[in-house]
Amino acid sequence: FPRIPQAQPGEEWLQVDLGVPKTVKGVIIQGARGGDSITAVEARAFVRKFKVSYSLNGRDWEYIQDPRTQQPKLFEGNMHYDTPDIRRFDPVPAQYVRVYPERWSPAGIGMRLEVLGCDWTDSKPTVETLGPTVKSEETTTPYPIEEEATECGENCSFEDDKDLQLPSGFNCNFDFPEEPCGWMYDHAKWLRSTWPGSSSPNDRTFPDDRNFLRLQSDGRREGQYARLISPPVHLPRSPVCMEFQYQATGGRGVALQGVREASQESKLLWVIREDQGDEWKHGRIILPSYDMEYQIVFEGVIGKGRSGEIAIDDIRISTDVPLENCMEPISAFAVDTLLPGTEPTVDTVPVQPIPAYWYYVMAAGGAVLVLVSVALALVLHYHRFRYAAKKTDHSITYKTSHYTNGAPLAVEPTLTIKLEQDRGSH
């Protein structure tokens, strides 16, 4: 990005140098913006399909293989420029990682990339094995990978926590009335309540008060609508996971949704509707990386004439939850925003069309079948008519070959008796 005139698949790539060999297990990709107008739709670029290759020395490259076909695997990319997508694969040792776009949006090729993996601690590479002037077997022979060599588990990222800069007051449990963190809300609608039990909604005991925000309606008012607005957030490099606790009761008229609001646009990230039960539940939303500052807005809605209650508490950024686990409940996310990886990648299978001449064969066969049916009907009608005519002509013919003199005659005698009905007598 920006748009490359007549770019061909496989000719462009995005390369990452990890500095030292790592155990790579996946990538997180996201689209990008460009151009003069930051609000123009034409400036929103992303990659729809891509391939991944890796190398230990920057010269010898291997593609991530599809285990079914043993060919370079074609990964599904982004469906929207602003939604991060995760693609995982079997662990491989690599210092360099390349992503090759195969298909992209009309706006061009745009990609932000994050590599997932862990430190590779089996052996410490030396200058001789990684130097560009030394050619040895180690540069092309895959290194052994063992599960105990990874120290941070399956889900870890090379993104440093120091790059995560959140405004003070974002993490909030609403315990202190004189300082409601950095979140803004209408105090006449969101009521600060105290948790009546011996523990907080997430089963942790709070110091001092155990408070939360509550939106309530008794069914006699014109409905309720309230917003809870976060401090401005700036995440230009990588997405993060936001956790919170919520409760929603009251039937169909109740809804709680999380929206990302920037200066000139808003996007629905998360929504639950109808009664969710009396228990407090965990919610998790991926806060996407974005070039501009934005705010997270929780909107609580209780319909006109409905009785219900919405409560929210303990909003915070979690650095120990991997992004693939940061979608809870899964029913709160639209289908087009689900992270790829929650559903398998499906290869397109071409279906051969029916040859055109088969349509003529089927039409001719149908015509022949109709003609045969008509002919059979005519034949049956004709035979029935003749049989009926014979029944109306009553006659009896008697022939004999017995003669008085014992000699045959030239003409054989015949006796015919006809029965006719006199129609004039009636």
Image (tube, rainbow, N blue to C red):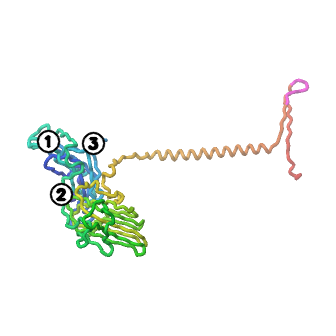
Query: What secondary structure is found at the residue carrying circle 1?
Result: loop
Residue 251: give x, y in percent of width and height.
42, 65
Judge whether 263 appears above or below 79 on screen. Answer: below
Which mark's residue is nearer the viewer, 3 or 1?
Answer: 1
Q: Which residue is mark 3?
A: 71
Q: Which residue is mark 1?
A: 123
Residue occupying the point 79% across, 45% down: 392
Could you say which quadrant of the image residue 277 lies in? bottom left
At label 1, counting other C-alpha atoms closer than 10 Å, the crowd grade (few under 14, some 14-19, many 20 or more) is few
Q: Cα distance, mark 3 to mark 1? A: 30 Å
Q: Amino acid at mark 1?
A: Ser
Q: Which residue is mark 2?
A: 161
Q: Cα distance, mark 1 to mark 2? A: 26 Å
> Is residue 294 among what the camera can see?
yes
Magenta segment: does it hold 402? yes
Which is nearer the eye, 127 or 392?
Answer: 127
Of callouts 1 and 2, which one flags the residue occurring earlier in the amino acid sequence? 1
Is residue 373 left or right of 283 when viewed as pictured? right
Q: Cα distance, mark 2 to mark 3? A: 36 Å
Of callouts 2 and 3, which one flags the residue occurring earlier in the amino acid sequence? 3
Is residue 363 left or right of 262 when viewed as pictured? right
Of callouts 3 and 1, which one flags the residue occurring earlier in the amino acid sequence? 3
